[in-house]
Image (cartoon, rainbow, N blue to C red):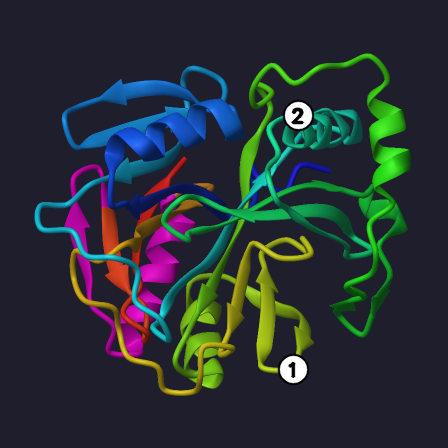
Amino acid sequence: MNFHTVPHTYTGEVHLNVLDINRAVQFYKEVIGFKVLEEAAAKVVLTADGNTPLLIIEQPENVMPKEAHKSGLYHFALLLPKRADLGAIIKHFIQQNVRIGAADHLVSEALYLSDPDGNGIEIYIDRDPAVWSWDNGKVAMSTDALDGESIIAESGEQTWDGLPVGTVMGHVHLHVANLPESETFYNALGFEVVTDYPQALFMSNGKYHHHIGLNTWNGEGVSRPTVGSVGLQSYTLIYPNEATLKEAITKVEALDGKVELNGSGFVTVDPSGIQINLRVG
């Protein structure tokens, strides 16, 4: 099942602020494997398939380093098409001496790293949804050791040649100020809680394991980062049709949330100050 296309609501491109655009572009091309889709002096749009924007990186004027203990990005997560792709990028990271973390989450197998500015990145593959374990609307997830050897073995002779064409933005995981407020807001946007951890909630549309992760690991009541500092500028949610998007907007406005027109879509801000672009796919 594809949880990142119609009829689901799912995550689209992520927009990051970085300290040094040239350093960031080099990292995202050479280490992660993106291709450049559009390029300006201080802003670059990156893609896996040569057509779909997945990541926008920008060096704002008077940019400041990443601030600790603020709301914003915990990580963005790139979902690869198949397990052999994950094996190929593990071999690539070993060759590049890239330090990574790793975990088996039962529903997925994941790698973790950060870009040169400290923005968190997850690269993962999903297990077949048929083997996910559900109980009373909650999916079983864990953080176990990753069997990296079997993943590498599955890749065989496959070498890393950049992000595969079928790569999508699998989910976005956020530092928020208040979990109940955030849950209410993201429920209005069309997502439901499908599992929880200490100080964290995982929400999805259409029974995915999660499109949105929320945590207060930076502290309850954290403040918003300074505008123009390194970190998350915004991210996008893609709706299957105008009716579903309109319903979400109506529910957000009923919570006294502000939704404004923004080009061909809309923009809102969650209770922790995180900007979200809303559009139809």
How packed is label 2: few (under 14 Cα within 10 Å), some, or many (20 or more)?
Answer: few
- Disc 1 secondary structure class: loop
- At 62% from the left edge and 34% from the top edge, which residue is drawn? 97
Disc number placed over residue 198 in the picture, else none: 1
Q: How many marks?
A: 2
| Nearer-the-camera pick, 193 or 251 | 193
Looking at the image, residue 260 lies above or below residue 57: below
Q: Which residues are magenta?
A: 242-265
Can see residue 256?
A: yes
Q: Position of residue 111 (x, y in %)?
A: 67, 45
- At 79% from the left edge and 25% from the top edge, which residue is drawn? 84
Disc number placed over residue 95 in the picture, else none: 2
- Residue 260 is inside the magenta segment: yes
Q: Position of residue 180 (x, y in %)?
A: 48, 84
Looking at the image, residue 95 lies above or below residue 21: above
Kind of residue sitting beneath label 1? Pro
Residue located farthest toward the front when viewing the structure as drawn: 97
| Nearer-the-camera pick, 246 or 101 | 101
From the image, state whether disc 1 or disc 2 is nearer to you.
2
Kind of residue sitting beneath label 2? Gln
Q: Quadrant of the C terminus?
A: top left
